Image (cartoon, helix red, strand yellow):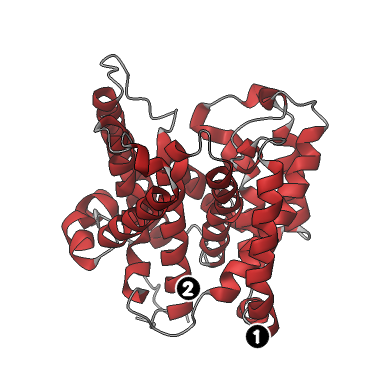
Protein backbone atom coordinates (compact mmCIF):
# COMPACT_ATOMS: atom_id res chain seq x y z
CA UNK A 1 0.00 0.00 0.00
CA UNK A 2 1.54 3.37 -1.04
CA UNK A 3 2.54 5.75 1.73
CA UNK A 4 0.13 8.63 2.32
CA UNK A 5 1.28 12.11 1.33
CA UNK A 6 1.57 14.23 4.50
CA UNK A 7 0.83 17.45 2.60
CA UNK A 8 -2.60 16.31 1.44
CA UNK A 9 -3.51 14.83 4.82
CA UNK A 10 -2.54 18.14 6.42
CA UNK A 11 -4.59 20.07 3.84
CA UNK A 12 -7.66 17.89 4.38
CA UNK A 13 -7.41 18.20 8.15
CA UNK A 14 -7.03 22.00 8.13
CA UNK A 15 -9.89 22.33 5.62
CA UNK A 16 -12.23 20.25 7.79
CA UNK A 17 -11.29 22.34 10.83
CA UNK A 18 -12.32 25.45 8.91
CA UNK A 19 -15.59 23.76 7.93
CA UNK A 20 -16.36 23.06 11.58
CA UNK A 21 -15.33 26.56 12.70
CA UNK A 22 -17.48 28.11 9.98
CA UNK A 23 -20.52 26.13 11.10
CA UNK A 24 -19.85 27.00 14.74
CA UNK A 25 -19.60 30.73 13.92
CA UNK A 26 -22.90 30.81 12.05
CA UNK A 27 -25.07 31.72 15.10
CA UNK A 28 -22.62 34.49 16.04
CA UNK A 29 -22.98 36.47 12.81
CA UNK A 30 -26.11 38.42 13.76
CA UNK A 31 -25.13 41.94 14.72
CA UNK A 32 -21.40 41.34 14.25
CA UNK A 33 -19.87 42.65 11.06
CA UNK A 34 -16.46 41.29 12.01
CA UNK A 35 -17.69 37.71 12.53
CA UNK A 36 -19.71 37.96 9.31
CA UNK A 37 -16.54 38.99 7.45
CA UNK A 38 -14.55 36.09 8.92
CA UNK A 39 -17.39 33.73 8.06
CA UNK A 40 -17.54 35.01 4.48
CA UNK A 41 -13.80 34.56 3.92
CA UNK A 42 -13.85 31.03 5.36
CA UNK A 43 -16.84 30.06 3.21
CA UNK A 44 -15.16 31.47 0.13
CA UNK A 45 -12.51 28.77 0.13
CA UNK A 46 -12.92 25.96 2.69
CA UNK A 47 -15.26 23.75 0.64
CA UNK A 48 -13.58 24.66 -2.69
CA UNK A 49 -10.25 23.55 -1.17
CA UNK A 50 -11.76 20.30 0.05
CA UNK A 51 -13.42 19.69 -3.34
CA UNK A 52 -10.27 20.46 -5.35
CA UNK A 53 -8.32 17.92 -3.30
CA UNK A 54 -11.18 15.41 -3.68
CA UNK A 55 -11.04 15.90 -7.45
CA UNK A 56 -7.28 15.43 -7.47
CA UNK A 57 -7.62 12.05 -5.74
CA UNK A 58 -10.45 11.01 -8.10
CA UNK A 59 -8.25 11.21 -11.21
CA UNK A 60 -7.90 7.44 -11.46
CA UNK A 61 -11.58 6.61 -11.05
CA UNK A 62 -12.42 4.33 -13.97
CA UNK A 63 -15.79 2.82 -12.96
CA UNK A 64 -14.14 -0.57 -12.46
CA UNK A 65 -15.79 -3.12 -10.12
CA UNK A 66 -13.59 -2.31 -7.12
CA UNK A 67 -13.95 1.45 -7.65
CA UNK A 68 -17.73 1.14 -7.88
CA UNK A 69 -17.83 -0.97 -4.71
CA UNK A 70 -15.85 1.66 -2.82
CA UNK A 71 -18.08 4.38 -4.27
CA UNK A 72 -21.16 2.64 -2.89
CA UNK A 73 -19.69 1.71 0.50
CA UNK A 74 -17.86 5.00 1.00
CA UNK A 75 -20.57 7.41 -0.18
CA UNK A 76 -23.98 5.82 -0.72
CA UNK A 77 -24.10 3.83 2.52
CA UNK A 78 -22.91 6.74 4.72
CA UNK A 79 -25.39 9.01 2.93
CA UNK A 80 -28.34 6.75 3.77
CA UNK A 81 -27.15 6.29 7.37
CA UNK A 82 -26.42 9.94 8.13
CA UNK A 83 -29.34 11.36 6.18
CA UNK A 84 -31.60 9.21 8.34
CA UNK A 85 -29.70 10.05 11.53
CA UNK A 86 -29.75 13.80 10.87
CA UNK A 87 -33.46 13.68 10.12
CA UNK A 88 -34.27 12.08 13.46
CA UNK A 89 -31.84 14.38 15.27
CA UNK A 90 -33.45 17.43 13.64
CA UNK A 91 -36.88 16.18 14.67
CA UNK A 92 -35.67 16.39 18.25
CA UNK A 93 -33.63 19.61 18.19
CA UNK A 94 -36.05 21.59 15.99
CA UNK A 95 -39.15 20.08 17.59
CA UNK A 96 -40.46 18.84 14.22
CA UNK A 97 -41.82 15.36 14.96
CA UNK A 98 -43.41 15.11 11.50
CA UNK A 99 -40.23 15.68 9.50
CA UNK A 100 -39.95 12.80 7.06
CA UNK A 101 -36.82 10.97 6.00
CA UNK A 102 -36.15 11.89 2.38
CA UNK A 103 -33.20 10.47 0.49
CA UNK A 104 -33.87 12.95 -2.33
CA UNK A 105 -33.49 16.07 -0.18
CA UNK A 106 -30.06 16.04 1.51
CA UNK A 107 -30.20 17.48 5.01
CA UNK A 108 -27.49 19.78 6.33
CA UNK A 109 -24.04 18.23 5.65
CA UNK A 110 -25.03 15.21 3.60
CA UNK A 111 -25.22 17.09 0.29
CA UNK A 112 -21.46 16.62 -0.12
CA UNK A 113 -21.80 12.82 -0.26
CA UNK A 114 -24.36 13.11 -3.05
CA UNK A 115 -22.20 15.61 -4.91
CA UNK A 116 -19.02 13.53 -4.62
CA UNK A 117 -20.91 10.45 -5.82
CA UNK A 118 -22.15 12.27 -8.94
CA UNK A 119 -18.80 13.93 -9.61
CA UNK A 120 -16.84 10.70 -9.37
CA UNK A 121 -19.26 8.90 -11.65
CA UNK A 122 -18.73 11.65 -14.21
CA UNK A 123 -14.92 11.47 -13.99
CA UNK A 124 -14.43 9.32 -17.15
CA UNK A 125 -16.45 11.92 -19.09
CA UNK A 126 -14.33 14.86 -17.91
CA UNK A 127 -11.16 12.96 -18.76
CA UNK A 128 -12.33 12.80 -22.40
CA UNK A 129 -13.35 16.48 -22.77
CA UNK A 130 -10.79 18.77 -24.41
CA UNK A 131 -11.41 21.79 -22.14
CA UNK A 132 -12.99 20.31 -19.03
CA UNK A 133 -12.72 23.31 -16.66
CA UNK A 134 -14.32 25.85 -19.05
CA UNK A 135 -17.08 23.35 -19.83
CA UNK A 136 -17.71 22.70 -16.13
CA UNK A 137 -17.77 26.46 -15.53
CA UNK A 138 -20.35 26.78 -18.30
CA UNK A 139 -22.50 24.14 -16.59
CA UNK A 140 -22.21 25.99 -13.27
CA UNK A 141 -23.11 29.31 -14.90
CA UNK A 142 -26.20 27.82 -16.52
CA UNK A 143 -27.25 26.26 -13.22
CA UNK A 144 -26.98 29.64 -11.47
CA UNK A 145 -29.72 31.08 -13.69
CA UNK A 146 -32.00 28.03 -13.59
CA UNK A 147 -34.28 28.14 -10.52
CA UNK A 148 -36.34 25.24 -11.86
CA UNK A 149 -33.58 22.78 -10.93
CA UNK A 150 -35.19 22.46 -7.50
CA UNK A 151 -33.92 20.83 -4.33
CA UNK A 152 -33.77 17.18 -5.39
CA UNK A 153 -30.34 15.78 -4.47
CA UNK A 154 -29.22 19.39 -3.96
CA UNK A 155 -28.39 19.57 -7.66
CA UNK A 156 -27.68 23.31 -7.55
CA UNK A 157 -24.69 22.64 -5.31
CA UNK A 158 -23.67 19.60 -7.34
CA UNK A 159 -23.57 21.68 -10.53
CA UNK A 160 -22.25 24.97 -9.13
CA UNK A 161 -19.39 23.34 -7.21
CA UNK A 162 -18.57 21.09 -10.19
CA UNK A 163 -15.77 23.32 -11.62
CA UNK A 164 -13.69 22.91 -8.46
CA UNK A 165 -13.87 19.12 -8.69
CA UNK A 166 -13.04 19.16 -12.41
CA UNK A 167 -10.13 21.48 -11.74
CA UNK A 168 -8.83 18.98 -9.18
CA UNK A 169 -9.05 16.24 -11.82
CA UNK A 170 -6.84 18.32 -14.10
CA UNK A 171 -4.16 19.14 -11.54
CA UNK A 172 -0.81 17.37 -11.35
CA UNK A 173 1.78 17.19 -8.54
CA UNK A 174 3.78 19.99 -10.16
CA UNK A 175 0.82 22.36 -9.83
CA UNK A 176 0.79 21.87 -6.07
CA UNK A 177 4.54 22.43 -5.98
CA UNK A 178 3.98 25.78 -7.71
CA UNK A 179 1.64 27.10 -5.01
CA UNK A 180 4.00 25.90 -2.28
CA UNK A 181 6.87 28.06 -3.48
CA UNK A 182 8.31 30.56 -1.02
CA UNK A 183 7.01 33.55 -2.97
CA UNK A 184 3.42 32.27 -2.75
CA UNK A 185 3.79 31.49 0.95
CA UNK A 186 5.05 35.01 1.63
CA UNK A 187 2.12 36.53 -0.28
CA UNK A 188 -0.53 34.27 1.25
CA UNK A 189 -1.06 36.06 4.57
CA UNK A 190 -1.29 39.57 3.02
CA UNK A 191 -3.81 38.18 0.50
CA UNK A 192 -5.92 36.74 3.31
CA UNK A 193 -5.72 40.05 5.17
CA UNK A 194 -6.86 41.91 2.04
CA UNK A 195 -9.67 39.38 1.51
CA UNK A 196 -10.83 39.94 5.10
CA UNK A 197 -10.85 43.71 4.53
CA UNK A 198 -12.86 43.28 1.32
CA UNK A 199 -15.27 40.96 3.11
CA UNK A 200 -15.72 43.49 5.92
CA UNK A 201 -16.64 46.14 3.33
CA UNK A 202 -18.87 43.73 1.39
CA UNK A 203 -20.89 42.32 4.31
CA UNK A 204 -23.54 45.10 4.35
CA UNK A 205 -23.69 45.23 0.55
CA UNK A 206 -23.54 41.63 -0.70
CA UNK A 207 -25.14 38.34 0.19
CA UNK A 208 -22.62 35.71 1.26
CA UNK A 209 -24.98 33.09 -0.19
CA UNK A 210 -23.18 33.44 -3.52
CA UNK A 211 -20.38 31.35 -1.99
CA UNK A 212 -22.81 28.66 -0.76
CA UNK A 213 -23.61 27.76 -4.40
CA UNK A 214 -27.00 26.37 -3.40
CA UNK A 215 -29.37 28.88 -5.04
CA UNK A 216 -29.94 30.41 -8.44
CA UNK A 217 -29.61 34.14 -8.98
CA UNK A 218 -33.38 34.59 -9.05
CA UNK A 219 -33.73 32.80 -5.70
CA UNK A 220 -31.21 35.26 -4.24
CA UNK A 221 -33.28 38.20 -5.49
CA UNK A 222 -30.83 39.13 -8.24
CA UNK A 223 -31.39 39.42 -12.00
CA UNK A 224 -30.70 36.25 -13.99
CA UNK A 225 -27.58 37.71 -15.66
CA UNK A 226 -25.95 38.11 -12.24
CA UNK A 227 -25.80 34.33 -11.80
CA UNK A 228 -23.16 33.59 -14.46
CA UNK A 229 -21.21 36.74 -13.56
CA UNK A 230 -21.10 35.92 -9.86
CA UNK A 231 -20.23 32.30 -10.65
CA UNK A 232 -17.09 33.49 -12.43
CA UNK A 233 -16.28 36.07 -9.74
CA UNK A 234 -16.74 33.54 -6.93
CA UNK A 235 -14.65 30.96 -8.81
CA UNK A 236 -11.80 33.41 -9.27
CA UNK A 237 -11.88 34.63 -5.65
CA UNK A 238 -12.11 31.11 -4.28
CA UNK A 239 -9.19 29.84 -6.37
CA UNK A 240 -6.93 32.65 -5.18
CA UNK A 241 -7.76 31.86 -1.55
CA UNK A 242 -7.44 28.10 -2.13
CA UNK A 243 -3.96 28.65 -3.58
CA UNK A 244 -2.99 30.78 -0.56
CA UNK A 245 -4.43 28.19 1.81
CA UNK A 246 -2.47 25.37 0.16
CA UNK A 247 0.67 27.51 0.21
CA UNK A 248 0.43 27.72 4.01
CA UNK A 249 -0.23 24.00 4.53
CA UNK A 250 2.90 22.27 5.94
CA UNK A 251 4.36 19.57 3.74
CA UNK A 252 6.04 17.62 6.54
CA UNK A 253 4.44 15.21 8.98
CA UNK A 254 2.93 17.00 11.99
CA UNK A 255 0.91 15.95 15.03
CA UNK A 256 -2.31 16.37 13.02
CA UNK A 257 -1.22 14.56 9.85
CA UNK A 258 -2.75 11.30 11.05
CA UNK A 259 -6.10 13.08 11.46
CA UNK A 260 -6.20 13.86 7.74
CA UNK A 261 -7.19 10.25 7.04
CA UNK A 262 -10.38 10.68 9.08
CA UNK A 263 -11.78 13.94 7.73
CA UNK A 264 -14.97 12.30 6.47
CA UNK A 265 -15.73 11.17 10.02
CA UNK A 266 -15.16 14.66 11.39
CA UNK A 267 -17.27 16.15 8.63
CA UNK A 268 -20.25 13.87 9.13
CA UNK A 269 -20.21 13.82 12.93
CA UNK A 270 -19.52 17.42 13.93
CA UNK A 271 -22.89 18.54 12.60
CA UNK A 272 -24.68 16.82 15.46
CA UNK A 273 -22.79 18.93 18.00
CA UNK A 274 -23.26 22.15 16.00
CA UNK A 275 -27.01 21.58 15.79
CA UNK A 276 -27.18 20.41 19.39
CA UNK A 277 -25.27 23.45 20.66
CA UNK A 278 -28.17 25.69 19.67
CA UNK A 279 -30.75 23.37 21.18
CA UNK A 280 -28.81 23.09 24.45
CA UNK A 281 -28.43 26.87 24.70
CA UNK A 282 -24.64 27.02 24.45
CA UNK A 283 -24.88 30.27 22.49
CA UNK A 284 -27.08 31.89 25.14
CA UNK A 285 -24.48 33.70 27.34
CA UNK A 286 -23.72 37.24 26.18
CA UNK A 287 -19.93 36.76 26.39
CA UNK A 288 -20.09 34.04 23.71
CA UNK A 289 -21.08 36.74 21.19
CA UNK A 290 -18.07 38.93 22.04
CA UNK A 291 -14.50 38.66 20.70
CA UNK A 292 -13.49 36.23 23.45
CA UNK A 293 -16.50 34.03 22.74
CA UNK A 294 -15.76 33.96 19.01
CA UNK A 295 -12.23 32.73 19.75
CA UNK A 296 -13.40 30.15 22.29
CA UNK A 297 -16.07 28.82 19.91
CA UNK A 298 -13.43 28.45 17.17
CA UNK A 299 -11.06 26.58 19.51
CA UNK A 300 -13.82 24.28 20.78
CA UNK A 301 -14.97 23.52 17.22
CA UNK A 302 -11.39 22.77 16.15
CA UNK A 303 -10.83 20.51 19.17
CA UNK A 304 -14.10 18.64 18.66
CA UNK A 305 -13.62 17.98 14.96
CA UNK A 306 -10.01 16.92 15.64
CA UNK A 307 -11.23 14.36 18.16
CA UNK A 308 -13.82 13.10 15.67
CA UNK A 309 -11.08 12.53 13.06
CA UNK A 310 -8.97 10.49 15.48
CA UNK A 311 -8.17 6.79 14.83
CA UNK A 312 -10.31 5.45 17.74
CA UNK A 313 -13.41 7.11 16.28
CA UNK A 314 -12.58 5.78 12.83
CA UNK A 315 -12.19 2.25 14.16
CA UNK A 316 -15.46 2.45 16.04
CA UNK A 317 -17.56 3.84 13.19
CA UNK A 318 -15.89 2.28 10.15
CA UNK A 319 -18.83 -0.11 9.90
CA UNK A 320 -21.13 2.75 8.84
CA UNK A 321 -18.73 5.27 7.26
CA UNK A 322 -16.43 2.90 5.37
CA UNK A 323 -18.00 -0.57 5.50
CA UNK A 324 -16.45 -3.36 3.47
CA UNK A 325 -19.73 -5.07 2.49
CA UNK A 326 -18.02 -7.53 0.17
CA UNK A 327 -20.97 -9.84 0.77
CA UNK A 328 -23.18 -7.45 -1.20
CA UNK A 329 -21.12 -7.55 -4.40
CA UNK A 330 -20.37 -10.21 -6.93
CA UNK A 331 -16.83 -11.42 -7.05
CA UNK A 332 -15.05 -10.98 -10.35
CA UNK A 333 -15.19 -14.25 -12.24
CA UNK A 334 -12.03 -15.59 -13.80
CA UNK A 335 -12.14 -15.72 -17.60
CA UNK A 336 -11.42 -19.28 -18.77
CA UNK A 337 -8.49 -19.71 -21.15
CA UNK A 338 -9.35 -21.66 -24.25
CA UNK A 339 -7.01 -24.53 -25.11
CA UNK A 340 -4.72 -23.85 -28.03
CA UNK A 341 -5.13 -20.10 -27.78
CA UNK A 342 -2.34 -17.77 -26.68
- The circle on residue 8 is 2
Q: Quadrant of the N terminus?
A: bottom left
Q: Position of residue 38 (x, y in %)?
A: 56, 51
Q: Is residue 1 above or below residue 131?
A: below
User: How far apart are the two marked residues, 2 and 1, measured between alpha carbons?
Assistant: 18 Å
Q: Residue placed at 41% from the left, 41% from the top?
A: 289
Q: Is residue 237 above or below residue 59?
A: above
- Residue 160 in which image quadrant: top right
Q: Secondary structure at mark 1?
A: helix
Q: Position of residue 269 (x, y in %)?
A: 29, 48
Q: Is residue 140 above or below residue 127?
A: above
Q: Residue furthest right?
A: 225
Q: Residue placed at 33% from the left, 69% from the top?
A: 259
Q: Residue placed at 66% from the left, 40% from the top?
A: 203
Q: Residue furthest top?
A: 98
Q: Position of residue 56 (x, y in %)?
A: 56, 66
- The circle on residue 182 is 1
Q: Secondary structure at mark 2?
A: helix
- Residue 144 in which image quadrant: top right
Q: Earlier in the sequence, mark 2 or mark 1?
A: 2
Amino acid sequence: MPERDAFFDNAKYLAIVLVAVGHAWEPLRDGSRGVSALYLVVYAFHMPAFIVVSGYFSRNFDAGPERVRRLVTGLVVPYVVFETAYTFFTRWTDQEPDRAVSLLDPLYLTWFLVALFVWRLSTPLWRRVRQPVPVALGVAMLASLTPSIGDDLDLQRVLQFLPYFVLGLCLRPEHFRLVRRRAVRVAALPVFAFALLLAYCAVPRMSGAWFYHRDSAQELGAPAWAGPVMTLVAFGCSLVLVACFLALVPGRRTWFTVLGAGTLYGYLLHGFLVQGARFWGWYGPAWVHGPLGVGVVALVAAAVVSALCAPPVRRGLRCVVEPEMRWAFRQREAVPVQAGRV
